[in-house]
Image (cartoon, rainbow, N blue to C red):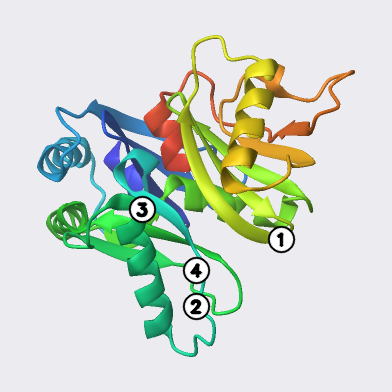
Amino acid sequence: MLSSFKSGFGQSLRIGIAPDALALVRTSIWPHERARLLGQVAATGADPVSLGAALGMLLGEHDVAGLPATVVLSDDLVRLWQVMPPDGAARQADLVAAAALRYQALFGAGLGGWTISADWDAARPFLAAALPLALLEQLTAAASSQRFKLVEIVPQFVAAMNQHRRVRRAGAWFGVVHGGVLSVAAFDGDLLAAVRTAPIPAGADRDWLEGHVAREALRVGLSRPERLQICGPAPTGWASSAGRLKFACTLFEDETDPLWPDCARLALTGRAP
């Protein structure tokens, strides 16, 4: 069984890590081969040590040596924020300093124990993410002990934005639904203005969505968007329908097996079609 898993060119792994569960998915570059959920495990805690132990249990059931792996982290495990580049920024060090200052203002502490990754841009606002160093160490140790190739570690929201970057329409905001949470990137034209996250209440309908978007627009000082584009398992009732004139809402098609758990859907976020 393991030989068939390891045979063939173009196979890779995707690992989804959320505070409560982890999943391992095998993918292939060949269009006739569908993604396969290899396993999932529950996590006993959201701290790096507990997640590292759960990851060891998950990977220990499979021969993953030599395979490339992408890790997608739930946004619950990272910190995301928008950074305005300082006037006259000429070096990346200026952008890093601006991101660190903005981080401290938003989260009330320095970057001790966290590392920043960002789409650095001196000309326009950009998205930054802070990942816990202790969790990165657990992932590096797992790659070393299980002998797989750790090629990328990415927050879910960043993976989703990159995946749908080319289809984001002018004037649209972008949202991701995962684990009962809606994360939204608010744009002022083509410029990123803010990233906002909120739990989705039970039974949230289109009226809730419209009220939520209106409140977030007020908070960040923007007009309501012309369109909201959402990926993930969003309620179907959020999609645009006759008589809905406040803003349009597009739900990107989700090709993931609807019976798969959230952690497996997380693992596939950002996968190229």
First along the sequence among labels 1 and 3? 3
Q: Residue at x 60, y 72 (%)?
A: 124
First along the sequence among labels 4 and 2? 2
Q: Which numbered circle lies on residue 119?
A: 4
Q: Which numbered circle lies on residue 106?
A: 3
Real-space Cα separation, disc 2 to disc 3, in angstroms: 17 Å
Q: Hey, what amino acid is under mark 1? A: Asp
Real-space Cα separation, disc 1 to disc 4, in angstroms: 15 Å
Please, what secondary structure does the residue beneath circle 2 have? loop
First along the sequence among labels 1 and 4? 4
Coordinates of residue 153 in the picture (x, y in percent) = 35, 57
Q: Hey, what amino acid is under mark 4? A: Asp
First along the sequence among labels 2 and 3? 2
First along the sequence among labels 3 and 4? 3
Please, what secondary structure does the residue beneath circle 1 have? loop
Q: Hey, what amino acid is under mark 3? A: Leu
